[in-house]
Image (cartoon, rainbow, N blue to C red):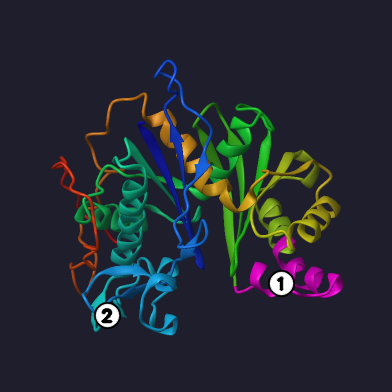
Amino acid sequence: MPYVLGIDIGAGHTRAAVCRRDSGTGRGWGPPQPVPLGARGRMVSSALAMTPEGDVVPGDLGRRPAETAVGGYLRRVGDSSPMLFGGSRFPAHGLVAAMARWVVDRVWQQLDEPPERIALAYPSGWGNGRLHLVHAALAEADLAQTALVTRARAVVECHQAAGRVPAVGGLLLAFRIGGSTCEVTVAAPHGPGRLELLGSAELDEVAGFDVEGATAADARAVLTPTVDLAEQTVSDCRVAPGDLSAVLIAGGSASVYPHVSDLLAAAFPVPVLRDQDPPMTVAGGAALLDRLRAHRPPRQQPLGPAPADPPETATDAWPQVTCARPPRPPLAIPAVRTGDR
């Protein structure tokens, strides 16, 4: 059954969701559904490891000790210095593409057919330079037609599809909390699939992992800086807290939601909403956006105007993901020039 695929590569874990075509009419699409990526769960480590055979896999699925896996590449995208991986050096955007390639192949193996479309969510604060680098790396990994969507857009789409917020009007605060980062974005929806980002900020090293097993007081102390960041971002956008229509929570775990919901409700006098499956909100929202794209002709041009000058990179090679990949038909890959970050 045809499907579209949404991918969420976080700092700590990676998740995926699919929307399938309605088996009745063949025209509609079903709701997003998680795809189990791990051996025993839905998510896998975002850190990458290289097997003795030279295949690239998530660190928690490799046979070598997990501490040899390489993570943190998302925050390194755009750096001129490559990252040491498997005895060689690769640019960080190449590792992003390697992770996306592994997810696509994993889902392909489980569903016995390739996706019609792929959408990869990325940090909402990234600019065109980083997007061009990732887009070029995806092309090298035979994923040139992958749509790049902001995490904030995916969060909003997931809530809109569920009818929690309208498709047009109002201002929204998307609050995504992960295991080691928190991202907040102020956005204005202008219709299905259309979102204006007014401001975005990210906080590293203060998030969900620190709350596991903590007392209520300690958990709130850990999470307070993330709410402070949300308040500051809203203020920087010249928006009053009461001018928001809603705060949308994504990511996190069951131990985080009660505390962060209470803190956000105290800071913003508007509804604080979360999906019934917050860890899958970004991946599910990306799949929903990809579902919209499946009704349109494929894009023939690379994402945005190509900058004039090539970036300063140490290598143009990418890690090769070859483990048990299903045979693929040839893809038409448009030429993409990378630019300065």
Which residue does the image show at 29% across and 58% down from the upper left? Answer: 133
Q: What amino acid type should be assigned to the residue bearing mark 2?
A: Gly
Image quadrant holding the C terminus, namely: bottom left
Above or below — where is 321 with respect to 149? below
Q: What amino acid type should be assigned to the residue bearing mark 1?
A: Glu
Where is residue 296, by image quadrant? top left
Q: Which residues are magenta?
A: 205-227
The picture places residue 274, in percent across and down from the top left corner, at 70, 45
> Distance from label 1 to label 2 (Cα)?
32 Å
Q: Tell me: 158 left or right of 165.
A: left
Q: How many discs mark residues in the rendered view?
A: 2
Q: State the SS at label 1.
A: loop
Q: Residue 111 in magenta?
A: no
Above or below — where is 167 with respect to 181? above
Q: Main secondary structure of the magenta part?
A: helix
Which residue does the image show at 73% across and 40% down from the upper left? Answer: 246
Which residue does the image show at 50% across and 64% down from the upper left? Answer: 13
Which residue does the image show at 42% across and 15% down from the upper left? Answer: 25
The picture places residue 117, in percent across and down from the top left corner, at 34, 37
Image mark for residue 86: 2
Label 1: few (<14), some (14–19) or many (≥20) C-alpha neighbours in 10 Å: few
